[in-house]
Image: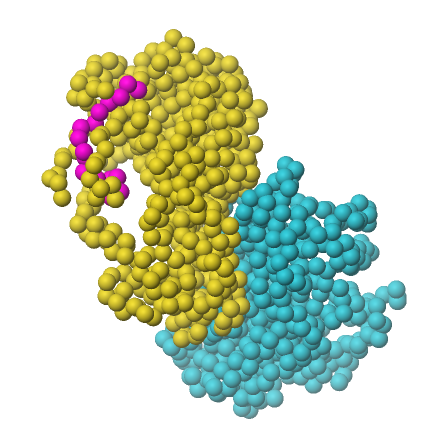
Chain colours: A yellow, B cyan
Amino acid sequence: MRLISLLVCSLLVSSTLPALAADEKVDLALVNKIRDEGTNRSKIMETLSVLTDEIGPRLTGSPSLKKAGDWSKAQLTEWGLQNAQVVSIAPFGRSWVLEKAAMRMVAPSNLELVAIPKAWTPGTDGVKRGKVVYAKLENDDDLAKWKGKLKGTIVLRDAMTPTKLHTTPDAKRYTDQELHDLEHMDLGGAPARPPTDMAELAKRMAFAKKINPYLTEEGVIATVNVSRGDDGTIFVAGGGSYKQGEPTGPSALVMSTEQYNRVFRLIEKKKDVEVEVEVAVNFGDEDPANSINVFADIPGTDKKDEIVMLGGHLDSWHAGTGATDNAAGVAVAMEAVRLLKAINFKPRRTIRIALWGGEEQGLLGSRDFINKNVAARPESTDPKEKDLPSFMRRPTGPLMLKPLHGKISAYYNLDNGGGKIRGIYAENNAAAKAIFDAWLAPFHDLGAKTATLRKTGSTDHVSFDAVGVPGFQFIQEPMDYFTRTHHSNMDLFDKIQKGDMMQAAMVMANFVAHTANRDELIPRKPMPPEPARPAAR
Amino acid sequence: MRLISLLVCSLLVSSTLPALAADEKVDLALVNKIRDEGTNRSKIMETLSVLTDEIGPRLTGSPSLKKAGDWSKAQLTEWGLQNAQVVSIAPFGRSWVLEKAAMRMVAPSNLELVAIPKAWTPGTDGVKRGKVVYAKLENDDDLAKWKGKLKGTIVLRDAMTPTKLHTTPDAKRYTDQELHDLEHMDLGGAPARPPTDMAELAKRMAFAKKINPYLTEEGVIATVNVSRGDDGTIFVAGGGSYKQGEPTGPSALVMSTEQYNRVFRLIEKKKDVEVEVEVAVNFGDEDPANSINVFADIPGTDKKDEIVMLGGHLDSWHAGTGATDNAAGVAVAMEAVRLLKAINFKPRRTIRIALWGGEEQGLLGSRDFINKNVAARPESTDPKEKDLPSFMRRPTGPLMLKPLHGKISAYYNLDNGGGKIRGIYAENNAAAKAIFDAWLAPFHDLGAKTATLRKTGSTDHVSFDAVGVPGFQFIQEPMDYFTRTHHSNMDLFDKIQKGDMMQAAMVMANFVAHTANRDELIPRKPMPPEPARPAAR
């Protein structure tokens, strides 16, 4: 391990000057082979169907994530990849499997409600019936006001949410103009985001911690939030806590918007609304085998100790089958390496596919990989710090680089739904953009043509970029990702378009193969500055 | 009662020549009052909320239709209407109330399925668990093939249904061009629809009658159809039978498309899929009080024995709360008469609001009214004929006109969803169109401006038009009626736009008031020709 300051110099010296697109070599014979295999003998929808229809949702910490890991390890091995392994990222937290969830209004009239439990909230211990109340619980005064009044109730946590008429399409593809705008930046354009008010955030987090014990103590049967979706689409992620020993509160569900609003209006009209609810979950202790990353290699030749990585995240939320988020990314990455094996591609550098766990809980799988193999700061010994989300923790010391840091040429990630690739976010790396422009050229006819210097976040390439290793996420068609499938009960196989997936796998294979075989590593940006170390709290 | 041939002459003589728009009187002082009350003191959303949120779905023959009838009778009386009455349209058939419906996949993994029973199919008599099979049952060979193999199974009745990416908006409003096209007709444009092959239809109906007894005899637990909707929207209407004594078959549900497809793919992959299903229904004998029409009057003055009617249908399907189909039409008609009472309008003719039952089962309520009061053919005494849908029955004799036939100036219906009125279908009545053009003029600014000679069908104005009494349906914005709400679980209050409903009530009030006060009845078209009487089968 070396300190950053030493390594930054060596990296800047060793990397080539930014190549212009025209100078970057493109192996069109290789492109031909990738396009032939990817177009005529694609297996991507079979891969997707196993992950979604057969294995189903793959919540981190749960047996189905292990199952997905075991299956993908075996499949990658069958396709000829080597060193396939499932690596635990424990400690993570508890296993949670939804067994059953039913909610119906039984007074003033019958109505089958579509309501889905939040992950890591408990069951109801059989069928329970209770009066529905709306209780705003946003500060200590609210808690005092409702004290003693919620026993045996089902508590609505949100005000009514108006729905909108869908006069714009749920699903869209980028227009040429939008792609042009994505590539061209107005640096003065967006107002700077105000810095997070850490004191305010800490206050809100402290209050949030009171809610679950309060609801349990008050004897609430279940809580219900309104979904942000409509038309039967329900967006639902986690609640309770996956951390061993933390209070989970009572059963917590998210209900379809229009039904929630109906119940809410009835309560506003002073009608007595009662519901019957039964939630059964299998809430298990931590099993390290259920919190995993999966890796497999196509070993390199003359530069085999350098690696190029690609991947997506294997874990998902539980309401659908995690088709667009992110079986799509996993299947595309798997198909990309299958293509390269099928055409007998011999990479100079080692190609490593990584299927991450724990992405939905904060990029846990990719961070685990980075911490163990690429770069890390010392672990904090302060128990208070451990309780905080990672972005709120004080840096414990300088970033320590590990052997792989200088060896990873780039990591390519796909995690923006089921649409085809329209380009790539070059993450402010102008040298990389010039290279990507060249590699995109033979895929312009399939719609992939834009390399933008813009950054994008919220998925696993960030873990690489954060420690100075080139990590990139592709630009994908928006489709109906944010309107219908992202973290919803509609994140299902049918939402994926076959032609889009085939294209994405070919583009990804092309990027990976060219990264593996170019003379130099992908040029790097300057290392990120060391954060200031605030005084101990 | 007189024979038609006599009356046709008298009608043609008594009606005025078609008025030109410019000649038709428009009472702008009246329009001002209607627009003031309808804009500033609208109660339409309160009416809608009672019908949908409080009373809920209003299936014909079921207690909630009676409840809706009783409530609307009382409300209309409270607003000052007279002679409010609830009139039975029995015999109709059985009462059916959905108490509970839960379906979940329990193997190969757990999944809460969104599946809604078809009306008038039975419950499962507790929780049942069974293997899922896909059985195509479309002819006698299919029945023979599956004989003895379906005991204790849940039968998928449909092949997999591909879903489409929603690249066009679910909801739309008419453009000026579309309204222009709606008003202007190319008579040679649409190819003539081939006449229904009655022999083929009879054959299919005969086969269909075998299915329910077959499924019951084979010991099938439940059948499942795929919904035509997606994203969680499920379209479901009736199954089984509402006719006392007819076989209903086993419980029959409709499942959300993407989930159905997942189950279907698992079966195609030879996975053993099992589901647990529990449906509880309250399937009651006929109660004549549950199959009803509602009427109420604003009595006329100098022409009080002539009437102008307006309405929508009070009955609905059961999966939602029948908000757009057709609490919207009912609420608009109720608001229209409320407006006229609130502004103290004194009509020359009697204004009669009609809220129909049994529309969804074939315009039963409006036909009952027409048969009893306006025009009827003799009842068939052939029991075979009684089994046939009305459009397949042989005419039993000439249409006999009753006293009200010559007294109804027009009937105005609203039953195309929750959107505002853009105009009216003049049903090939050029004389009426000229009048309507004049009445629409003061509502052009609110988007109502198109009177088209086109005909439209599938709702209660047809019952009037079929016997030569002017019956009209308004043109409404398409909104998301056919994509999301029509006969679906999403036909809920939130799908209704307040501004649209307010506008529709004012336009309807305006049409009704002007019809009530013009010197002549609305001109009539020639009587429909007597159908040929085929030889007895």
At 34% across and 70% down in the image, what residue appears?
A149
**Which quadrant, please, contains the N terminus of chain B?**
bottom right
Residue numbers of the magenta segment: A388-404
At 57% across and 88% down in the image, what residue appears?
B83
In the rendered image, the residue lying farthest to the right is B536
Q: Nearer the viewer, residue B209 or B268?
A: B268
Q: Nearer the viewer, residue A462 or B537?
A: A462
Does residue A419 appear in this view? no
Does residue B95 appear in this view? yes
At 52% across and 26% down in the image, what residue appears?
A74
- In reply to whether residue B240 is colored magenta, the answer given is no
Quick check: A324 left or right of B130?
A: left
Quick check: B267 left or right of A112?
A: right
In the rendered image, the residue lying farthest to the bottom is B302
Q: Is residue A340 above or below residue B334?
A: above
Kindly indicate the quadrant of the structure image that contains residue A260: bottom left
Residue A477 picture location, percent across and down: 42, 37
Q: Is residue B11 above or below residue A342?
A: below
Q: Nearer the viewer, residue B117 or A452?
A: B117
Kindly indicate the quadrant of the structure image that contains residue A382: top left
At 49% across and 54% down in the image, what residue appears?
A280
Q: Is residue B342 above or below residue B46?
A: below
Residue A411 picture location, percent across and down: 35, 25
